[in-house]
Image (tube, rainbow, N blue to C red):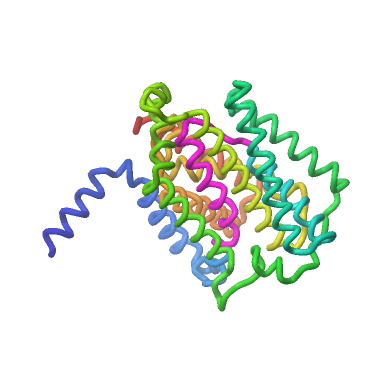
Amino acid sequence: MAKAATTLTGAFFANWRQNIIYIGFVVIFVVFALTLSDKGFLNPNNLLNIVRQTAMIAVMAVAMTFVLSAGEIDLSVGAVAGLATVTVAMAIAVAGPVGGVLAGLATGLAVGMFNGWLTTKVGIPSFLTTLAMMGIAKGVAMWISDTAAVPILSPSYSWVFGGGSVGPIPVLMFWMALIAGVGHVALRRSGFGRRVLATGGGETAARYSGIDTASIKFRVLVLSSCAAALAGMLYAGRLQSGRFQLGEGDELSVIAAAVLGGTSLFGGKGTVIGTIVGALMIGLINNGLILMGLEFSQQLIARGGIIILAVALSQKKR
């Protein structure tokens, strides 16, 4: 038994670069636990708040794992989440919670199909397509809401989509676990996941093997926008309002979470479990920086440093 444990431990650290996200998460948690114990870092409520603040990033990052694995990128997720909060809030005021859910999903589906069409049919690189969509989605959200917050007065919607809890466990944790589980199975155990990885690993070879790479790219971009819309629905439920500012800048954290977790920016490699740990790690760092008393500008600098580190590690692994 001891020999087997030693062997497993040795294998883990022998592939330290592959497992850097897990090592880093533990190290950062221990450092914060030791240095911020007097500021309530280990308080259960604080740890659950990290989950609440991270859940929306994690949901979008799972879908981003598929996008990056297919060799594409989506920079519009934060803006789409903000637009979804507004469309959901406005629809709930007219058609109730069910109408709000349908409006949110329709928002993600419409944006995703447009992004996918421009990328796969028109031939515009996804970087430019989604960069433009970032501005369009934010502009539409500001326009239809007149830049004002739209309140959500449905307690049932707010409870299910982010505001409720089962005992001490926030509903957001269940959403995060559900999306992570479905995403992991889809990427690792399904034919679709294998085709996504094959497309990103070598598009020409995948095409010659009979994979419709254009269809795969179209579908992952639709998936990404729908996940962003779901994140927006969770934002709206948790904060009981729709605001165009919600989700702003989230694309940086989403991409960082996926790449930190082991997903390659060059395509062909992705892991949903690593992405979830990456998202939690970013939430952990943000929480620790806040407890340290750092300003928001300093937190942005730290996030940028995380992305640089993630890219460097990804390049070395490749």
Residue at (50%, 45%) from the top-left corner?
257
Q: Of all residues shown, which one is farthest toward the front? A: 210
Q: Main secondary structure of the magenta part?
A: helix
Nearer the observer, 264 or 194: 194
Number of numbered discs: 0
| Range of residues picked out in magenta | 50-75
Which residue is pictured at 50% across the width and 63% down the height?
Answer: 36
* Residue 65 location (% of width, % of height): 48, 42
Quarter of the image that includes the N terminus? bottom left
- At x 75%, y 34%, the residue is 136
**Residue 105 at x, y percent in the picture:** 67, 50
Which one is in front, 260 or 26?
260
Which x, y percent locates residue 64? Answer: 52, 42
Judge whether 83 appears above or below 27 on screen.
above
Image quadrant of residue 15? Answer: top left
Q: Is residue 18 magenta?
A: no
Q: 290 left or right of 261? A: right
Say which residue appears at 79% left-offset and 44% top-offset: 141
The answer to whether residue 313 shows anywhere in this view is no
Residue 71 lies within the magenta run: yes
x%, y% of residue 28?
Answer: 43, 54
Above or below, 248 relative to 157: above
